[in-house]
Amino acid sequence: MSAERDALLSLVLRDSSENIAEAQLVRLQCFWPDIAGPLAKHCEPQSLRERRLIVRIEQSVYAQELQLRGREIVQRAATLLGIELRDLRIENGPIDWNAAGRRRIPPSGQPGSAPGPTDTKTEPGMDADREQMLEGLRRLL
């Protein structure tokens, strides 16, 4: 019976740590504009691995600025999450802005145009949705 209990406990703990990591990433993505400032329009946190913040950037032109502000961004993220982060790693690649919680709407007058990373308009009610989601995360963490 002890081996079964240990196996079950191991599964629960593994799932819990994965859920915590996922919740930390979601929290980081929600507060990313506050952490990265104007640079947040061009990059997003992808994962937290081995005390390292992995950030994806769409255009390499912003990589240098992200690298220069890396220590400040890592410190802000670590403070927000209440964990120790040692550094930042930059990955180049496309960003799925909808999956990142950055719901965008096309500029008015251009029906059907695809939203892009430079569009800053959010859907009506987005702030209320964000606040509700953040309150739920605060209760979880």
Image: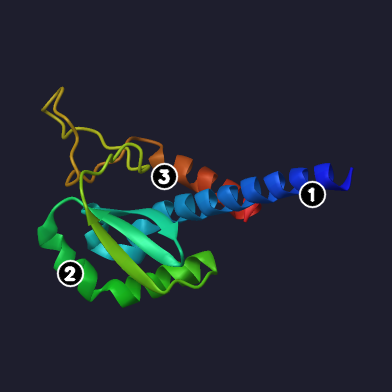
Q: Which residue is mark 2?
A: 65
Residue under the image location 69 percent in, 51 percent down: 13
> Which residue is at the front of the view, 109 or 64?
64
Label 1 is placed on what type of residue? Answer: Asp
Q: Position of residue 109 (x, y in %)?
A: 11, 28
Q: Which residue is mark 1?
A: 6
Looking at the rendered image, the disc whose residue lies closer to the viewer, 2 or 3, is 2
Q: Quadrant of residue 82?
A: bottom right
Q: Quadrant of residue 32?
A: bottom left
Tag 1 and tag 3, C-beta contact below 8 Å:
no
Q: Is residue 121 above or below residue 56?
A: above
Label 3 is placed on what type of residue? Answer: Asp
Tag 1 and tag 2, C-beta contact below 8 Å:
no
Residue under the image location 15 percent in, 22 percent down: 112
Q: Is residue 22 left or right of residue 43?
A: right
Q: Earlier in the sequence, mark 2 or mark 3?
A: 2
Q: Earlier in the sequence, mark 1 or mark 3?
A: 1
Badge number at residue 39: none
Q: CA distance from mark 2 to mark 3?
A: 28 Å
Label 2 is placed on what type of residue? Answer: Glu
Badge 1 element: helix
Q: Residues within 10 Å of mark 2 (few under 14, many from 20)?
A: few
Q: Is residue 91 left or right of residue 18?
A: left
Q: Is residue 14 above or below residue 114?
A: below
Tag 2 and tag 3, C-beta contact below 8 Å:
no
Where, quadrant-wise, is the C terminus in this rendering? bottom right
Q: CA distance from mark 1 to mark 2?
A: 48 Å
| Extreme residue in the right direction | 1
Q: Position of residue 68 (x, y in %)?
A: 21, 75
